[in-house]
Amino acid sequence: MSSEKRNALGRGLGALLNDDNVGTAPANTGRGVAGNPNPTVNELGSVNEIRISEIEVNPFQPRTEFDEMALGELADSIKLQGLIQPITVRKVSANKYQLISGERRLRASKIAGLTQIPAYIRTANDQQMLEMALIENIQRQDLNAIEVALSFQRMMEECNLKQEELGDRVSKNRSTVTNYLRLLKLPPGIQASIRDGQISMGHAKALITINDPAAQLYLHKQIIQNGLSVRKVEEMARHLQRAVPRKEGKKPEPLSFQVQKIQDDLASKFGARVKLKLDDDGKGAIEIPFLSQDDLGRILEMLDW
């Protein structure tokens, strides 16, 4: 790898690949000694053709969804031109490799009917494997914002990184990292809309500024139904945030697990922050707040009013 290409990768994937390990590998040639998981100098320093049947998927792969149509198109391209960009693997035994990066290419190659695939062979421990897979996926242009956020979260939790260190790894500033991580605090339904491309990152950042989940859900529904622009959502978010009263006084007693679950299920059903009040005698009330006349109409319609 040239110094120019290495520098282009910054402090991310290129640093983790650590080609300096080449000099410490056994000075064998060919495909290595049977039973020895250490790659040879020749394997580390060049592209190798290895059997697809000998490759196991990286257990740390953060990407969970692959576009079947895009995979089919890549498979057709591979049939015509071969695989242009090699995958990266590590050798774990004589005839077994573990994928570090390139699962999409591996899947498409299987669809194309290949039995062998070009690959770079690297040395890496499990944490390096995780970081490599996460960084490669974060750098992909087609990764959705929730996948990026989950990858950031995994890197912080499983690689024991602080936000500043994470930013250095992925060449992002701290505010960018923070904005992605805050997406994971949004209600699950909103996260799903971000994942599926129904709302943009700009919409999501506006929703994050609202502290009340019920208000977030209400505005989220308005975005989907009316195709609101990011600027309009920002304006409505400021208005809704001012309209949400601040809570004062002592905190209420925590609800039991069973009551909390009922309350959460009702909140999910109505798209509002439902409050379930219950006294020691088993009596109580269900409170469903609404944010506008339209929101009230929506709730009444769900109640078949």
Image (cartoon, helix red, strand yellow):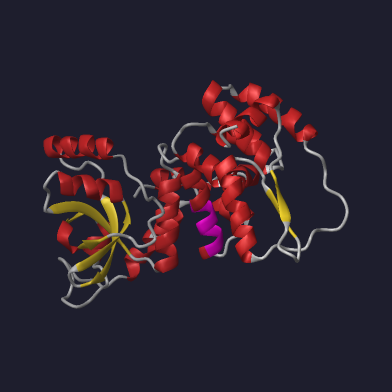
Residue 227: x percent and y percent? 53, 22
Q: Quadrant of residue 95?
A: bottom left
| Vertical arrangement, residue 248 with respect to residue 79, above or below | below
Left or right: where 113 falls relative to 161: left
Q: Work out whether residue 147 or residue 169 is closer to the camera in this orientation and state it.
A: 147
Q: Work out whether residue 82 or residue 269 is closer to the camera in this orientation and state it.
A: 269
Q: Quadrant of residue 22?
A: bottom left
Quarter of the rendering occupied by the C terminus: top right
Residue 47: x percent and y percent? 22, 53
Q: Work out whether residue 194 or residue 109 is closer to the camera in this orientation and state it.
A: 194
Residue at (16, 35) in percent of width and height: 76
Left or right: where 239 falls relative to 192: right
Magenta stretch contains residue 101: no
Residue 148: x percent and y percent? 49, 46
**Residue range corresponding to the magenta coloring:** 151-157
Residue 21 appears in the picture as rendered: yes
